[in-house]
């Protein structure tokens, strides 16, 4: 083209240096920053310039004639090309150096806003000039380059050449394209928009420019196709798009462009930067360093006579939730011997002190800095081999990628196949918490687990089996305390349930014992989450100090379970609080006796059983067979199947959902039967666990419907018995209740007695108050009453008025001494006298069962032997004090035949199984064995559960 576009100068150039991919990315980043700053910079036009411009119209002017001759007038009418001329009638400011016949072109941004004006002198040779004062040269564009629908982008030199290409493509009906024209003042195309995977056809006038543009656009992610240099050469006089459009019509030029573009080959992307060659080698089992000396010679230096790798980059999360990074490091000596794996905290790796764990076999050569080189070499060679893993220093449920997973040593169970990405790294003493991969058919293992109820009475077996499966559903807020005589097989039996969480547990190896300190037991229990945690052998036959320590430890553990609160303490510099989480599993404690204060007893389900499991050959044989099954992993297989089943229904069966949907309804029913406020909640929790367990057995087909009904009835009976016995336990645990109970017992045994307040002889109904008939009583003879030879007088019996009730008027010193002696014999302990009398007043005074003077715990009475008018302060209890609190004989103990069992029908926890269960109202499922199933599952021989 003559006088309108910039013509390139052909010259011979030297070979072009191609930048590396890294250099190209750096250049792209720099160019984008420069272009972004320039685009945001406000434009400065000559004063009055815009007022002096007139938009080209159909009027015949030199400017229109030029555009028509070039074939660009259609682009003007389509408003793709904004063209102006100087307004000759404008009387105002005339732009500097703007001839009357100048053609002005408007340059827009992506939003269509004119950001620059460039003028060309018609029929003159030379570059166009921008009407700005800042020297900024934007590209010309046919539209918004940011449009996501654009598939191809054409980039050419020159703004009017780009308009010519746009006119030709438009004539061919081409869609989804954009054109940008790069002025000579701007050596690079605009690349602020997203060019990823966009097909780009570029035409530049020099090889250097083509290479520079290609490298930049490829770094931006474009697929670059370079058009030949002669693309626009139609005749000898044509080299640019405007020249070609002047010779050819728009449609022919468009056809030529599309044909040429289809034949253009995509420029191959540059090879990625080669990986830097590090200077370390492994050769002959040794670590070597290769370096260049001062004379340029390559030398090799031996650093160490072993090699090592970081096999795993471990993220360890302890039971407190604190995270620590560790490396699992393996090594091999120069002579091929494997070094033992080491787990090294990441903070200790740099110092390399861990090499001492490998002893004399890990030899590092002498020399300054060689230890640093060894560390660097190990890290470089481990970049590929090191696997990132997460390890929890606890058992139980956690979340992985939105799904519940169950952690045990060596196996992480899920609703499907086990995974290895998350593992448990437990304390050495907890490595037996190890569950196997769930078997395809666990029916035999499940039946064997339920068959453990055959070995011991239901009162012991059913709570133990419930506590075994309960922690998988969440943390119970009570402790199961099993009390019985030593040597009766109690520990061996409990170990069978502990073996549900790993075949390594047995009677000689339980998670903890009371030989450990209280704080260590609490730490261990907080790490054992969602598993059974048995603590064996609580005894109170040591010294008074040791007994007090055991009581304190027991109190701390039970309260931590019941309240689900951890223990916090400051570190030595009082700058940081360390908190031990509460126990996270089900706690079972065994011992020969239990000295529990009232608050601890309310958080405990106490099972007192004196059955000798080793006394009869049959029970001893069953226990021995169960021990064998535990050692072979049968019970652990049952628990693995249960964990997998719960994982499939995790949201509806665990934690608060379990309590809300299954525990609370049962608690409402049990709460109406009396007892401490916590007791119905504890026992409802246990019964709800049986409901889930039997639903699981029904769903897996391990038990038939008749067996499930039998187990459920026995579970309900056991819970009702525990509700009654627990009420007695709580009364004994309450100091006031224990005192009244012991006093009633002493009166029944005639170890203490009362005398009549008026005359000092036998009181009314002397047989109730410690007296025994010694003679008489026949044919009108008066009965002679006497006290026991060792009986102790503890007070008086009298009335406040003739028609009023009788009161026990107790001598505080004498009665406290007698009752304390009996409490010690029963391994119980009363508070000091003043506290005891206050507790009695709180318990009995409100309903008139204890008579007290205002502000006191006593009531003054005249008694035999005192001076006339002298009144002695005595503890005054109404004669019916035993009606509610003290006398075990008055407790309405429920039995297994209580009709209340009908108030607890079994309903599967899975709605889809309700219809299956209710469709068999009383008919057992077809039995696949040779004999009909017994009505009571406990009647089935033990070995039949092992099918």
Image (cartoon, rainbow, N blue to C red):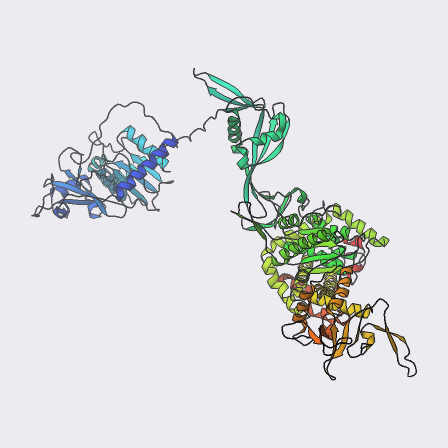
Question: Based on the displayed image, in which of its 4 quarters is residue 266 positioned?
Answer: top left
Question: Residue 205, image x and y in percent?
Answer: 26, 31
Specify the quadrant of the image occupied by residue 548. Answer: bottom right
Residue 222 picture location, percent across and down: 36, 38
Tell which of 657 and 816 is nearer to you: 816
Residue 685 sits in which quadrant? bottom right
- Residue 68 in view in this figure: no
Instruction: Determine the residue positioned at 19% across, 35% down.
Output: 5
Residue 125 x, y percent position in the rendering: 15, 33
Where is residue 505 drawn, in percent x and y? 72, 46
Relative placement, left or right, of 658 versus 900 is left
Query: In which quadrant is the N terminus drawn?
Result: top left
In the image, what residue occupies the spot 69% across and 44% down? 432
Whether residue 646 is visible: yes
At x 32%, y 30%, the residue is 211
Q: Against 139, is 708 above or below?
A: below
Seen from the viewer's position, the closer of residues 465 and 210 is 465
Q: Is residue 554 shown left or right of residue 183?
A: right
């Amino acid at each position: 083209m003559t006088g309108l576009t910039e013509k390139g100068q052909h010259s011979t150039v030297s070979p072009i240096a191609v930048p590396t991919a890294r250099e190209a990315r750096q250049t792209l980043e720099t160019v984008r920053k420069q272009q972004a700053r320039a685009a945001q910079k406000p434009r400065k036009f000559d004063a009055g310039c815009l007022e002096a411009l007139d938009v080209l119209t159909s009027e015949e002017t030199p400017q229109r004639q030029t555009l028509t001759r070039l074939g660009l007038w259609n682009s003007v009418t389509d408003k793709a090309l904004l063209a102006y001329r100087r307004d000759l009638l404008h009387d105002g400011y005339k732009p500097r150096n703007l001839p009357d016949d100048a053609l002005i072109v408007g340059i827009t941004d992506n939003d269509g806003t004119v950001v620059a004006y460039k003028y060309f002198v018609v029929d003159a040779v030379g570059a166009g000039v921008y009407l700005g004062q800042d020297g900024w040269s934007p590209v010309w564009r046919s539209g918004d380059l940011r449009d996501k629908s654009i598939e191809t982008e054409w980039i050419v030199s020159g703004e009017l050449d780009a308009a010519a290409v746009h006119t030709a493509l438009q004539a061919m009906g081409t869609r989804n394209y954009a054109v940008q024209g790069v002025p000579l003042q701007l050596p690079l195309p605009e690349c602020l928009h997203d060019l990823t995977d966009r097909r780009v056809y570029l035409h530049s006038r020099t090889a250097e420019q083509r290479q520079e543009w290609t490298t930049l656009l490829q770094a931006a992610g474009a697929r670059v196709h370079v058009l030949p240099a002669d693309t626009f050469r139609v005749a000898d006089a044509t080299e640019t798009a405007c020249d070609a459009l002047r010779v050819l019509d728009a449609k022919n030029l468009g056809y030529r462009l599309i044909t040429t573009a289809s034949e253009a080959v995509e420029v191959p992307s540059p090879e990625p930067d080669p990986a830097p060659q590090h200077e370390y080698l492994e050769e002959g089992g040794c670590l070597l360093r290769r370096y260049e000396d001062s004379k340029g010679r390559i030398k090799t230096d031996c650093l160490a006579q072993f090699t090592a790798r970081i096999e795993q980059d471990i993220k360890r999360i302890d039971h407190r939730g604190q995270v620590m990074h560790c490396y699992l490091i393996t090594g091999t000596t120069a002579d091929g011997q494997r070094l033992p794996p080491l787990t090294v905290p990441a903070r200790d790796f740099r110092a390399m002190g861990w090499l001492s764990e490998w002893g004399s076999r890990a030899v590092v050569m002498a020399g300054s800095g060689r230890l640093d080189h060894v560390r660097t070499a190990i890290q470089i060679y481990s970049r590929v081999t090191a696997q990132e893993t997460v390890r929890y220093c606890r058992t139980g449920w956690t979340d992985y990628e939105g799904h519940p997973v169950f952690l045990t040593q060596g196996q992480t169970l899920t609703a499907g196949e086990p995974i290895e990405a998350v593992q448990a790294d437990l304390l050495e003493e907890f490595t037996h918490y190890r569950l196997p991969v769930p078997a395809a058919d666990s029916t035999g293992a499940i039946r064997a687990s339920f068959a453990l109820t055959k070995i011991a009475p239901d009162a012991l077996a059913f709570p133990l089996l419930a506590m075994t499966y309960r922690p998988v559903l969440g943390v119970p807020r009570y402790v199961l305390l099993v009390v019985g005589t030593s040597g009766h097989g109690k520990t061996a039996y409990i170990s069978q349930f502990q073996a549900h969480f790993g075949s390594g547990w047995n009677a000689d190896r339980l998670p903890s014992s009371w030989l450990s300190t209280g704080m260590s037991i609490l730490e261990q229990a907080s790490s054992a989450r969602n598993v059974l945690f048995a603590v064996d052998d609580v005894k109170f036959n040591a010294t008074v100090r040791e007994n007090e320590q055991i009581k304190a430890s027991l109190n701390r553990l039970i309260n931590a379970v019941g309240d689900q609160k951890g223990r916090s303490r400051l570190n030595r510099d009082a700058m940081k609080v360390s908190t031990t989480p509460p126990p996270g599993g089900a706690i079972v404690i065994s011992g020969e006796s239990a000295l529990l204060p009232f608050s601890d007893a309310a958080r405990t389900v106490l099972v007192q059983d004196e059955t000798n499991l080793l006394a009869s050959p049959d029970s001893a044989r069953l226990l021995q067979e169960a021990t064998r099954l535990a050692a072979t992993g049968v019970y652990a297989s049952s628990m693995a199947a249960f964990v997998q089943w719960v994982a499939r229904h995790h949201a509806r069966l665990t934690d608060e959902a379990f309590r809300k949907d299954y525990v609370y309804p049962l608690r409402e029913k049990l709460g109406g039967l009396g007892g401490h406020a916590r007791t119905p909640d504890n026992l409802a929790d246990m019964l709800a666990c049986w409901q889930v367990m039997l639903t699981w057995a029904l769903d897996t087909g391990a038990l038939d419907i008749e067996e499930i009904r039998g187990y459920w009835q026995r579970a309900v009976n056991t819970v009702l018995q525990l509700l009654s016995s627990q009420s007695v336990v709580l009364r004994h645990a309450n100091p006031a209740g224990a005192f009244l109970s012991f006093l009633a017992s002493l009166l029944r045994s005639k170890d203490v007695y009362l005398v009549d307040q008026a005359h000092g002889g036998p009181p009314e109904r002397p047989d109730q108050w410690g007296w025994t008939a010694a003679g008489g009583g026949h044919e009108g003879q008066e009965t002679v009453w006497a006290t026991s030879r060792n009986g102790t007088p503890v007070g008086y019996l009298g009335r406040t008025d003739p028609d009023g009730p009788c009161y026990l008027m107790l001598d505080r010193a004498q009665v406290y001494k007698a009752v304390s002696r009996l409490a010690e014999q029963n391994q119980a302990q009363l508070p000091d006298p003043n506290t005891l009398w206050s507790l009695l007043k709180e318990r009995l005074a409100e309903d008139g069962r204890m008579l007290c003077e205002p502000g006191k715990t006593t009531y003054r009475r005249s008694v035999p032997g005192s001076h006339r008018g002298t009144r002695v302060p005595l503890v005054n209890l109404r004669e019916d004090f035993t009606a509610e609190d003290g006398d075990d004989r008055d407790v309405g103990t429920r039995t297994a035949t209580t009709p209340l069992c009908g108030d607890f029908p079994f309903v599967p926890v899975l709605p889809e199984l309700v219809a299956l269960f209710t469709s068999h109202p009383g008919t057992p499922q077809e039995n696949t064995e040779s004999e009909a199933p017994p009505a009571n599952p406990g009647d089935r021989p033990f070995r039949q559960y092992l099918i």
